[in-house]
Image (spheres, helix red, strand yellow):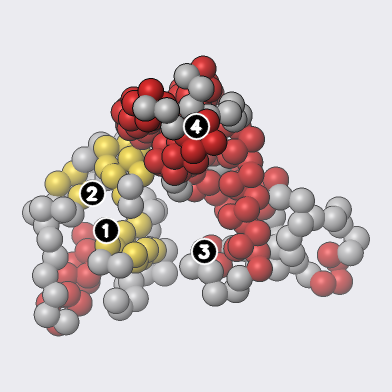
Amino acid sequence: MSDTISDETTLVKFADDLTLVTPAAAIVSVEAEFASVQSWARDNKLQINFAKTKEIVITRCGRRGFMQPPLIPRVARENLVKLLGVTFNNHLSFADHVRKLQIVARQRQYLLQLLNRQGLDSTCLDIVFKAIALSTMLYAMPAFSGYLTESDVNSLQAVINKAFKLGISPQFLICVLLLVGLTASFSKLNTNRQHCLVPLLPPERNLETRSTLRARGHRFSLPQCKSELFKDAYINRVLFSYF
């Protein structure tokens, strides 16, 4: 895939999925950037699936006087989208994703109850619970857990509490699992220079001043967080909390 027209625009690629991220203050409009993508696709004999192409405009909740950008021809604008298995809305709320996780977890808990009635021992039940329920709940969790509200966390914890009451699995604390996942994911990022998220990291601290600052578990400069949304993003949260 070719580069974007503007350095302010970001292209995120995964297999045959492409996400185009354009800030509101960008010099080049999202329409122009998308037209560039279409041009590249035509030149390379590729066809864009417009039925699966969606646009979402992310704004702060309760913001007044916001002018929506012009619609892109043939591209549907949605308030709720699913990206690589994670659902979020135009205010970066993941409440809908949490609700879907609850539904899936409850369905799989019913399956585990059937296995329990058939005599499957507790050790095997715990393994199956982690494989088909807990793994689904924790999928991509470090990336968006900073945007979860207390209500979202409590909803996920309720699923685990119910599994514990049913004798399906030991009781876990979802907040601890989130912290462990955050630390583990950054450990890989901190040691693997080929990691796909390395370009998102800020510059490394000056070697001359690094020893005079408070010891940290990483070598990077701390970013300037000008908003809560920016502060709660994965890279920023982990840089401030990882020691």
Q: Inspect the image, locate mark 1, and give the three-letter code of the amino acid beneath it.
A: Val
Q: Which mark is residue 54?
A: none
Q: Residue at x 85, y 55 (%)?
A: 215
Q: Mark 2 or mark 4, which is nearer to you? A: 4
Separation of disc 1 and disc 4 at Cα?
55 Å
* Above or below: residue 66 compared with residue 30: above
Tell me the residue that label 2 is attached to.
55
Task: Please state the horizontal and vertical placement of residue 83, each as a whole percent of the image.
Answer: 31, 49
Q: Residue at x 42, y 28 (%)?
A: 119
Q: Residue at x 28, y 63 (%)?
A: 18
Separation of disc 2 and disc 3 at Cα?
23 Å
State which tag comes first along the sequence, 2 or 3.
Answer: 2
Query: Callout 3: few (<14), some (14-19), or many (20+) C-alpha neighbours within 10 Å?
Result: few
State which tag comes first along the sequence, 2 or 4.
Answer: 2
Q: Which mark is residue 30?
A: 1
Are discs 1 and 2 less than 8 Å apart at CB?
Answer: yes
Q: Which mark is residue 197?
A: 3
Separation of disc 1 and disc 2 at Cα?
10 Å
- Circle 1: element type: helix
Q: Mark 2 or mark 3, which is nearer to you? A: 3
